[in-house]
Amino acid sequence: MSKHTKYEAQVEGNSYAAAQAKFEEIVEQLRQEPAQTMRHDEIEGLVETAGRELLRRLVQGHMDERSQRRASEPVIDAQGQVHPHKRMNTRGLMTIFGEVSVKRQGHGGIGIEGLHPLDAELNLPEELYSHTLSKRVAEAAAKESFEEVMTEITQHTGVEIPKRQVEELTERAAQDFEAFYEQRNMGLSDGLSDTPKSKSTGDILVITVDGKGVPMLNRDLRAYTQAAAARASPHLKHRASKGEKPHRKRMATVAAVYTIEPWVRLPEQIMQELHPADVPTAEPVPRSPRPRPENKRVWASLKHIPPEVIGQALSEAHQRDPAHAKHWTALVDGNPTQIEALQAEATQRGITLTIILDLIHVLEYLWSAAWVLFDEADPNVEVWIHDHLDALLHGRSSLMAAGLRRSATLRGLSAEQRKPIDRCADYLLNHRDYLHYDRYLSAGFPIATGVIEGACRHLVKDRMELTGARWGMDSAESVLRLRALRSSGDFEPYWAFHLKQEFQRRHLSLYANDKIPQLFPVSIRVA
């Protein structure tokens, strides 16, 4: 419009009259009996309930005021079609204060879908529920069951949302998870997230991956698990017998990436930490304070196979250290698929990656072997574990494996009896390239997967294994994503990104040149 255009506003009525009337009603109610003799908690309840209606009327008044806005130029869609026909339409919007109606002018034509520029200006969602209400559902769904989400939303807003809609809102809320991190990793965060800088964090960059089962509906189990479930003949009708696998879980791949300062230690210090009573030293070996993980990001996925999640983890790591100036380490539990994927990704990206086998996982194999050689109550088993742990921490895993086999042979154990010992020896030999704990300790590298173990418990087990839970794929993946965002401290920047994506999908992409027509009040007169 030209710079000579003048606008003259004409006030027509008071859109907030209903809100003002409600406010006066609340004040009068507080002045009269029985409010004058109520307890303070009763007053709070009265004001909260009545206040919701006041706030709803304020939002409704604003929507009524905005309904007077009209497009100042022709409305043209993304296909270049002009929408000449105009017609007033009304839609509902469920806010955190209750439902309001939004009256707006639609622009259409013969055989073309109508457009509503005011919807775009307000960034209205496709469904009934507002983005603020959707955010509250998403935050609650990341913490508790869908039934509890329904109860919490009603308690805090007075709004009732059916369970199916809670699930749908959760899925829509998480749909931009991968796009958010892809954009951030490409350096296109647009100020939505304070991405960690390589120079400001510790010199060790840690990648760690694990798996955790999620109980699923049969249709969303992997094919081989479905087949195993079909072949199974359970002894009991309603639960599995001892040692019987129910074949109802699908493995989620859990990943974590963080930086940390080097923490140089001696094998004796690790021995002290794990077996303080057995360390043969006159006094404790002093050690420096344990450094904390920095800028930790954790996430989990059921849909993506382990190599894909590992690829995401290395992309996240690259975003933190694009010059590969840090010491890249990967903590694993010995899973061959994970190790192969880490090696392949590292080779493809030209990264020097030190793969470290989790010490605690190795100890589990040692204990299994120990119970073959010692009675359950024999105190000498701790001395045996102590000696083998000492050898392990000094980098003598291959010699230890040979010694285990020799012990089994000298005792004349049968093939069945010595199975745990042979299993332990095989494990040590097959993973000997990842058991150089003497080198790792002197370099200050982490040697245990406490971060990923915590992530498996917090991200997956604590929420996904609630009593009786059986998940569909889309709901489970969405909840895992929302929990990951919260755990990584990224929920707020993600939500800002999500709203931008919603605006692009729902509104901007529908108009020519991605341009929403400007709107002005209908009472404005152009001179």
Image (spheres, rainbow, N blue to C red):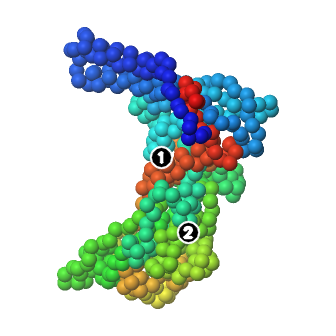
What residue would you read off at disc 2? 315
447 vs 141: above or below? below
Q: Is residue 301 left or right of residue 228?
A: left
Provide the secondary structure element on which disc 1 rests: loop
Along the horizontal axis of the image, is 457 left or right of 275? right
Task: Report crowding for label 1: few under 14, some 14 to 19, many 20 or more residues within 10 A (C-alpha).
Answer: many
Tell me the quadrant of the picture where the N terminus can be found: top right
* Residue 18 % position (x, y): 43, 17
In this picture, residue 138 sits left or right of residue 75: left
Identified at 68% across, 48% down, the residue is 513
The residue pinned by badge 1 equals 142
**Which image quadrant for residue 165?**
top right
| Residue kind at label 2, given as amino acid type | Ser
State the image coordinates of residue 404 (x, y, percent, origin top left): 47, 83
| Cα separation between marks 1 and 2 | 25 Å
Can residue 5 be seen here? The reply is yes
In the rendered image, the vertical position of residue 71 relative to residue 378, given as above or below: above
Residue 167: x and y, percent? 56, 39
